[in-house]
């Protein structure tokens, strides 16, 4: 299939009539940072899924997806009239090795909008080749796009920082992967798509002025609270690095607490805002296995679940290295980077306390959490089901229900070991104010995007039925709710789930 460039099609480029106010601050950074690039059209575009909740939050009207021309714009079949779309340049470390220049090989920046949620950038993923596509076709397949669309919204529903997904469009256009697949385009939304790799790029090119421009841009953007420079010897760039360290530590604590494995934590997939970004072979753990590797291509297990905190630290050191020309003080950089360890463990403990419904910290909480995780690991207990059942059990105990703990006990073979833990838990809960179970139910989701759920939605979508994508979107957007009638989505994975193999190919 040959794809024509939108510029050559003589298509109308009138802007879809939506109430939009463009800010486009990133575009003003200049040509060193991004190259104007038109999307490449796809034949027979159609909607696969739309995110009404996000559209409403953006202040868009109810039937926004029926806006004349919007389907074409969000598939890359015609440019958005006001301004050029852009592909940005970045570099990065992939699997621990410097990979040099990468860049938006299949992502196009459509612009930045002023919205009720604050300034947000729109990006198309899979809308064709860019100057940074290297050997790639600039495309994304339906399979991986459904996973990205659903998981971004699942993460958001869980309260985990992430890029969002507004829409998913499909096409009959063919894309070659291991087999022939169909193309799709995800409209991603985030305050910024800047990555560690954007900074590494200009540091590696020895362009300190560009590096400074980028850092100043982030500082001025008000995307995140940058700590007072005074606390960092008056060094604003050390303060910025501190903000990234803090956000990254908090993000990884979220991942570890919910059992999310990203799969490709290369520095080009690390958001400078501490968002989960670039959904590829990710997986929510079924059975709790700290050594789990979700990326079929990760033969060494570099990005195994339990290695994620350490990998994030390693990635922050790459960013710290890139910040050297800005901060000009290696001791200060080291001090900032080293704060990650404490921030991460505090943040994780805070998350685990919340999962246990604990509001009054005690020094023994860490060992309680550790012993629970050890038991889960030794039995490969289903992570999501354990925590959800435990939440219900805590609630039932408060209501003096007999056998409140039985559904949790049923999950274990080593009953004695669990019962010893259960006694410790009950003693711990006794020191807490009422409402432990209700608190836990707000921190332990019923619904996560298990691989097999995504797979079922993908298979149906590949057969032309997109209803399952929309059902999952609904369930995953409010994962702490009970969703009566949908219990099957919160059940143990079927036997075939363990044979699902997900690689980087997307
Ligand atoms: P990823 O592993 O998806 O984070 O991608 C790493 C790099 O490869 C980024 O620069 C991507 O833009 C680029 N890339 C991945 N897939 C494609 C593709 N199909 N076409 C062009 N570039 C791609
Ligand atoms: Mg990437």
Image: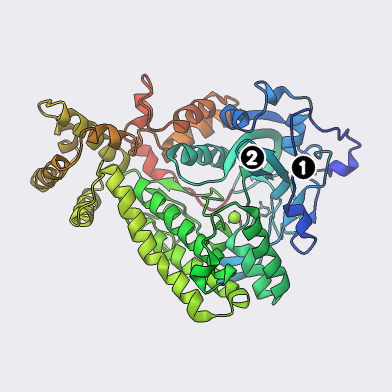
Residue sitting at 16 percent across and 26 percent down?
399
Tell whether 269 sits left or right of 393.
right
Q: Residue 26 at what x, y percent from top left?
A: 72, 53
Secondary element at tag 1: loop
Asked whether mark 2 and ligand 1 are closer than 8 Å, the reply comes as: no
* Residue at image location 75% in from the left, 41% down from the top: 22
Q: Looking at the image, can residue 149 be seen?
A: yes
Q: How many numbered callouts? A: 2
- At label 1, counting other C-alpha atoms closer than 10 Å, the crowd grade (few under 14, some 14-19, many 20 or more) is few
Q: Is residue 165 above or below residue 211?
A: above
- Percent across and percent down for residue 139 are 68, 46
Kindly report the distance in space between the C-alpha atoms of the residues bearing marks 2 and 1: 20 Å
Mark 1 Cβ inside 8 Å of ligand 1: no
Residue 40, compared with residue 324, is above or below; it is above
Instruction: Provide residue 365's location: percent of width, then percent of height.
Output: 21, 53
Q: Quadrant of residue 78?
A: top right
Q: Quadrant of ligand 2?
A: bottom right
| Residue name at image x 68 percent, y 69 percent | 212
- 186 lies left or right of 429: right
Taking 344 as reference, is 320 left or right? right
Q: Quadrant of the N terminus?
A: top right
Using the image, determine if residue 126 lies above or below residue 249: above
Q: Nearer the viewer, residue 294 or 209?
A: 209
Q: Which mark is residue 186?
A: 2
The reply to whether dot 2 and dot 1 touch (C-beta < 8 Å) is no
The answer to which of marks 2 and 1 sits earlier in the sequence is 1
Residue identified by numbered label 1: 1
Q: Which residue is at the far front?
A: 230
- Front-most of residues 221 and 89: 221
Q: The residue tagged with tag 2: helix, strand or loop?
A: strand
């Amino acid at each position: 299939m040959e794809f024509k460039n939108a510029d050559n099609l003589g298509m109308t480029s009138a802007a879809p009539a939506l109430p939009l106010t463009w800010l486009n601050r990133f575009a003003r950074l200049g040509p060193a940072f991004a190259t104007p690039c038109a999307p490449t059209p796809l034949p027979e575009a159609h909607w696969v899924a739309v995110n009404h909740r996000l559209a409403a939050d953006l202040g868009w009207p109810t039937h926004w997806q029926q806006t004349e021309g919007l389907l074409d714009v969000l598939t890359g079949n015609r440019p958005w009239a006001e301004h050029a779309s852009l592909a940005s340049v970045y570099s990065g470390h992939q699997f621990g090795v410097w990979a040099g220049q990468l860049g938006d090989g299949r992502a196009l920046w459509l612009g930045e909008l002023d919205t009720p949620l604050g300034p947000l950038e729109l990006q198309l993923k899979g809308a064709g080749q860019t100057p940074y596509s290297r050997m790639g076709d600039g495309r994304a397949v339906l399979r991986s796009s459904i996973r990205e669309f659903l998981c971004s919204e699942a993460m958001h529903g869980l309260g985990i920082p992430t890029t969002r997904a507004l829409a998913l469009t499909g096409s009959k256009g063919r894309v070659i992967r291991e087999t022939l697949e169909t193309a799709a385009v995800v409209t991603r939304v985030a305050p910024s798509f800047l990555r560690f790799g954007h900074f590494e790029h200009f540091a590696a090119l020895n362009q300190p002025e560009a590096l400074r421009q980028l850092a100043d841009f982030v500082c001025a953007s008000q995307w995140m609270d940058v700590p007072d420079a005074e606390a960092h010897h008056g060094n604003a760039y050390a303060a910025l690095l501190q903000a990234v360290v803090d956000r990254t530590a908090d993000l990884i604590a979220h991942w570890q607490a919910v059992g999310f494995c990203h799969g490709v934590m290369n520095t080009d997939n690390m958001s400078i805002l501490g968002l989960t970004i670039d959904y590829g072979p990710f997986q929510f753990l079924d059975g709790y296995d700290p050594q789990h590797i979700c990326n079929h291509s990760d033969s060494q297990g570099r990005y195994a679940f339990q290695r994620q905190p350490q990998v994030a630290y390693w990635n922050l050191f790459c960013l710290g290295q890139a910040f050297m020309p800005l901060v000009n003080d290696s001791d200060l950089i080291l001090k900032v980077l080293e704060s990650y360890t404490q921030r991460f463990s505090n943040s994780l403990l805070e998350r685990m306390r919340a999962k246990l419904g604990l509001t009054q910290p005690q020094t023994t909480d860490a060992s309680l959490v550790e012993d629970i995780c050890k038991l889960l690991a030794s039995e490969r207990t289903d992570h999501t089901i354990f925590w959800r059942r435990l939440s219900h059990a805590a609630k039932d105990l408060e209501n003096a229900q007999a056998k409140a703990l039985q559904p949790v006990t049923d999950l274990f073979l080593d009953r004695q070991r669990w019962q010893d833990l259960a006694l410790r838990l009950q003693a711990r809960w006794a020191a807490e104010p009422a409402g432990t179970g209700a608190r836990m139910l707000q921190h332990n989701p019923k619904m996560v995007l298990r691989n097999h759920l995504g797979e079922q939605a993908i298979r149906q979508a590949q057969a032309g039925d997109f209803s399952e994508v929309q059902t999952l979107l609904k369930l995953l957007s409010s994962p702490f709710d009970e969703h009566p009638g949908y219990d099957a989505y919160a059940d143990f994975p079927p036997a075939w789930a363990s044979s699902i193999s997900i690689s980087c190919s997307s």
